[in-house]
Image: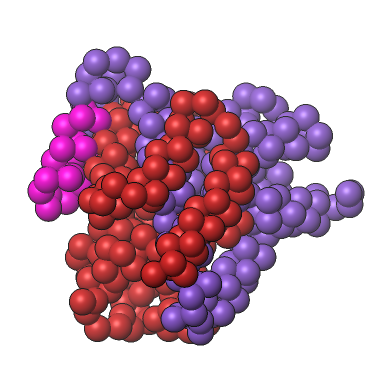
Chain colours: A purple, B red
């Protein structure tokens, strides 16, 4: 590992991203291990705070790597960590999607596609289940989840309205 | 049928909107934008493109932005969709981090967030129901695979990558068998 923190960030996140199959979420424990225990970039508390801030920010959950980079080396660190975490896998996704589109009607592609879809949907269902476990700590929170699920499934109301209402309830301190 | 192809500026704006709305996960917002509002993809096309993105290493929604952008606008499309998805959150999170460093505590934001996360969980449930509906119409192997994947990760708590790598080949083999048999 290099002693230059920027290079260390770049190398580490680039390598980590290639093993993050199924999403960035599955790589969070490994990020914690390396950032806190191995590299000593931040304390346990700082990592927990970074995770909380990344949850507060809209956008892909992978944004936590931006914060770790920011913590280690300021704005440059933030940019380097983000690009390292997304660059190699984006390049791979680009190449695969081009090949994928070229073999649009090949039987092997159709089989792979049909095989992946149910696994993917089961995984997203599991993610929702785990999110409910974390988010619904009392009956009010569970009610917000249930009401949002029903309205979002049955109507075309913009979910931002539901989020705004839920935020107000949260601010009131009931949750 | 899917509507006309998005232009590059449309791609950027669409993914930026998805990113800015995406508290507690951007996926439901991506599906809402692409399938329900813009009709750039059908429900099935979206399921397939997202399954591919999820199977590739790296962050799922980020991969999806590249896969989607590449399909509709080549390399430039991929770059523009990625920039739309990551640019605004990057700015927002750096501002949040600076606020946190200054005030040392974001309790008010945290309270609001606990409500928003509960709603985000509900939104994700609704989206899984929409994505899964075509699957569960016919009782065949796909709903079974989906249930095993769900139970493995959510109930038994096996690590997600292992479940993926273990189950995907089985599922693909089943799909292949059906395809060849016909």
Q: Is residue B40 visible?
A: yes
Picture quadrant of residue A83: bottom right
Is the residue A125 above or below the residue B68 in the image?
above
Rendering coords of residue B101 (x, y %): 55, 35
Q: Nearer the viewer, residue B114 or A134?
A: A134
Rendering coords of residue A107 (x, y %): 48, 75
Is the residue A52 above or below the residue A11 in the image?
above
Q: Which range is magenta?
A: A144-163
Q: Main secondary structure of the magenta part?
A: helix
Q: Looking at the image, how many numbered discs can be counted on the residues?
A: 0
Q: Is residue A113 visible?
A: no
Residue for point 47% across, 40% down: B149
Rendering coords of residue A30 (x, y %): 69, 37
Residue placed furthest toward the front: B181
> Magenta span has A146?
yes
> Magenta span has B64?
no
Is the residue B4 above or below the residue A107 in the image?
below
The quarter of the picture where the N terminus of chain B appears is bottom left
Residue for point 39% across, 69% down: B182
Residue for point 57% across, 68% down: A93
Is the residue B9 above or below the residue B92 in the image?
below
Q: Nearer the viewer, residue A9 or B2?
A: B2
Residue for point 58% across, 73% down: A96
Decide if residue B22 is on the left or right side of residue B145: left
Decide if residue A20 is on the left or right side of residue A173: right
Q: Nearer the viewer, residue B83 or B73?
A: B73
Decide if residue A27 is on the left or right side of residue B32: right
Rendering coords of residue A24 (x, y %): 56, 47
């Amino acid at each position: 590992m290099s002693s230059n923190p920027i290079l260390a960030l770049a190398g580490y996140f680039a390598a980590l991203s290639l093993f993050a199959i199924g999403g960035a979420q599955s790589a969070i424990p490994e990020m914690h291990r390396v950032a806190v225990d191995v590299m000593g970039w931040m304390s346990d508390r700082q990592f927990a705070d970074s995770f909380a801030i990344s949850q507060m920010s809209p956008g892909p959950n992978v944004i936590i790597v931006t914060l770790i980079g920011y913590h280690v080396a300021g704005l440059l660190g933030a940019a380097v960590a983000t690009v390292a975490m997304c660059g190699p896998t984006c390049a791979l996704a680009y190449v695969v999607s081009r090949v994928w589109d070229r073999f649009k009607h090949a039987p092997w592609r159709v089989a792979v596609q049909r095989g992946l879809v149910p696994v993917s949907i089961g995984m997203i269902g599991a993610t929702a289940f785990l999110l409910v476990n974390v988010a619904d700590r009392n009956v009010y929170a569970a009610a917000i989840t249930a009401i949002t699920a029903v309205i979002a499934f049955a109507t075309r109301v913009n979910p931002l309205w539901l989020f705004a209402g839920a935020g107000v309830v949260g601010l009131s301190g009931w949750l | 049928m899917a509507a006309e192809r998005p232009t590059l500026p449309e791609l950027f704006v669409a993914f930026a909107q998805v990113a800015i709305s995406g508290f507690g996960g951007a996926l439901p917002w991506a599906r809402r934008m692409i399938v329900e509002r813009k009709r750039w993809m059908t429900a099935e096309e979206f399921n397939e493109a997202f399954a591919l993105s999820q199977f590739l290493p790296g962050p799922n929604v980020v991969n999806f932005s590249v896969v989607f952008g590449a399909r509709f606008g080549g390399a430039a499309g991929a770059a523009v969709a990625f920039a739309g998805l990551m640019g605004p959150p990057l700015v927002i999170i750096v501002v949040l981090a600076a606020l946190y460093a200054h005030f040392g505590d974001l309790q008010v934001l945290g309270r609001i967030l606990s409500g928003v996360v509960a709603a985000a969980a509900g939104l994700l449930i609704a989206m899984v129901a929409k994505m899964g509906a075509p699957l569960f119409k016919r009782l065949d192997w796909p709903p079974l695979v989906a249930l095993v994947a769900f139970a493995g990760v959510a109930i038994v708590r096996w690590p997600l990558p292992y479940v993926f790598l273990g189950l995907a080949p089985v599922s693909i083999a089943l799909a292949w068998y059906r395809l060849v048999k016909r």
